[in-house]
Image (cartoon, rainbow, N blue to C red):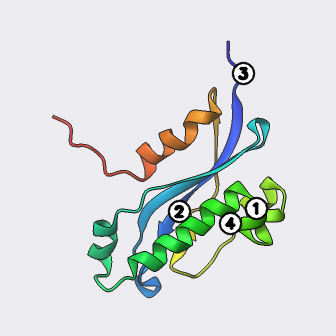
Amino acid sequence: MLARSSYDYAVIRVVPRVEREEFVNVGVLVSCPQAQLLAAGIELDSERLRALDPSVDVEAVRLHLQAIDRICQGGRDAGPIGQLPARARFHWLTAKRSSIIQMSAVHTGRCAQSDAIVEHLLERMVRTPKPTL
């Protein structure tokens, strides 16, 4: 039997007009200390984003989302926050903000394969559901 690991995750949201509180889920942020995993899965659907705000600067949003991925990877290219331990980076990234890029509340789960959890969460929380027949 495979050992199950606990993980924490948050959904990455883009809120193009903060005053309207409408958002599009664009990714997930996952922390699994047992597996030494801190990862972001990001899939920006610019059409869905423009449906909320046709004037949104998609390229600026894309650059900010890339910064989240760099911070997850850590190291010098990620700036001062990227130098922190992985768990501290997760908490910094999931801190509440009133900005165009926000995180959901942090949720907890358990998995047998930590390397598959990002893909699983992207499918459930970010990608447009496929129609059922």
Give the left or right position of residue 49, taking residue 42 as reference.
left
76 or 57, nearer to the observer: 76
Report the amino acid beneath label 1: Arg
Q: Count neighbours of disc 4 (C-alpha within 10 A) and say few if under 14, some if 14 to 19, many if 20 or more.
A: some
Image coordinates of residue 89 in percent, x first then y, are 76, 61
Residue beneath disc 3: 3
Q: Secondary structure at mark 3?
A: loop
Q: Which residue is mark 1?
A: 89
Q: CA distance from mark 1 to mark 2?
A: 15 Å
Please state which of residues 77 and 117 is positioned toward the viewer in this rendering: 77
Q: Which residue is mark 2?
A: 12
3 or 2: tag closer to the N-terminus? 3
Residue situated furthest top in the rendering: 1
Q: Is residue 107 above or below residue 12?
A: above
Q: Residue at x 32, y 81 (%)?
A: 53
Q: Residues within 10 Å of mark 3 (few under 14, many from 20)?
A: few
Distance from label 3 to label 4 (Cα)?
Answer: 28 Å
Q: Earlier in the sequence, mark 3 or mark 4?
A: 3
Q: Quadrant of the C terminus?
A: top left
